[in-house]
Image: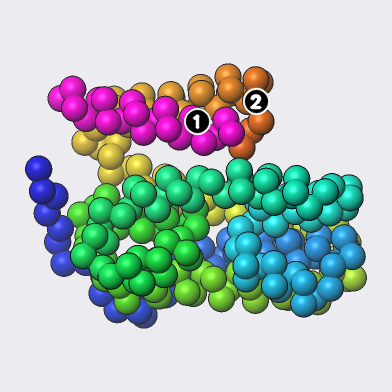
Amino acid sequence: MEKSYTKGYETFKEGVIACIPTILGYFGIGIAAGILGKNAGLSVFSIVLMAGIIYGGSSQFIIIGMLMTNSPISAIIFTTFLVNARHFLMSLSVSEYFRDFSMGKSIGIGSLLTDESYGVLMTQIMTGKQVSFNWINGLNITAYVVWIASNFLGALLGNLIPNPEQLGLDFALVAMFIGLVVLQIQGELKVRRTKTLLILLSVVMSVYVLSNLISLEISVLIATLIGCGIGVFLDDAK
């Protein structure tokens, strides 16, 4: 059944405004990543380059930690791939909403899609709002620039703040993402409370059980697939 959309967000500026919660979270966690990178012996240029190419908070923290323990490059690359593999799932889940876009535009959207921008995007989609290419660019590009800038600032402050955890900067991204998830599912809870709660419970329980057997990164991926499978099954069973 074709899903209908109401007139939504179209301009680049509206995308920038929608990115404000992400900006607030990125400043805290980006500065923390820059500080830790500097304390690990990385140059300011290396930290900024990593932020621009890797563009992932969890991955960058893992890379910095593995560099500090002199882990082999092959292990760092493989671990980073596993941690970021969830982006395949996120891109696939929104691909149907951009099927009319050219391949170049789709690649541009997918390349800058993060957990947080995905959360903001899905919040609009779940409320029946259509979003334009300009809007998603406003959201993605703003988040990307802020992330690089905050890493750069953290690298400059690296010698002044040796322990960012004392300021609570390590929790900034977690708090922001919790807020985005709540905004995304609150509409679903009103109309499909039981199904939504079952999916959430299945994901949480899967992560808990699997993390005791395999790595946390793989556990999250498998739990996500389980949650998607249960969602499809419950949707078809109505």
Tell me, for residue 214, which label it has, or none.
Answer: 2
Contact flag, marks 1 and 2 (Cβ < 8 Å)? yes
Residue 217: % across, % down: 61, 37
Instruction: Considering the whole magenta stretch, tell me its main secondary structure.
Output: helix
| Residue 233 belongs to the span the image colors magenta | yes
- Residue 23, image quadrant: bottom right
Instruction: Name the kind of residue labelled 1 in the image.
Output: Ile
Q: Which residues are the magenta region? A: 218-238
Amino acid bearing label 2 = Ile
Other-residue count near label 1 (Cα within 10 Å), few / some / many at <14 / 14–19 / ≥20? some
Q: Which residue is mark 1?
A: 222
Residue 197 position in % (x across, y down) = 36, 28
- Quarter of the image for residue 149 reads bottom right
At x 15%, y 58%, the residue is 5
SS for dot 2: loop
Residue drawn at x 90%, y 70% is: 159
Where's residue 150, x and y in %?
Answer: 67, 72
Q: Give residue 104's position: percent from left, percent from top.
A: 36, 72
> The N terminus is located in which quarter?
top left
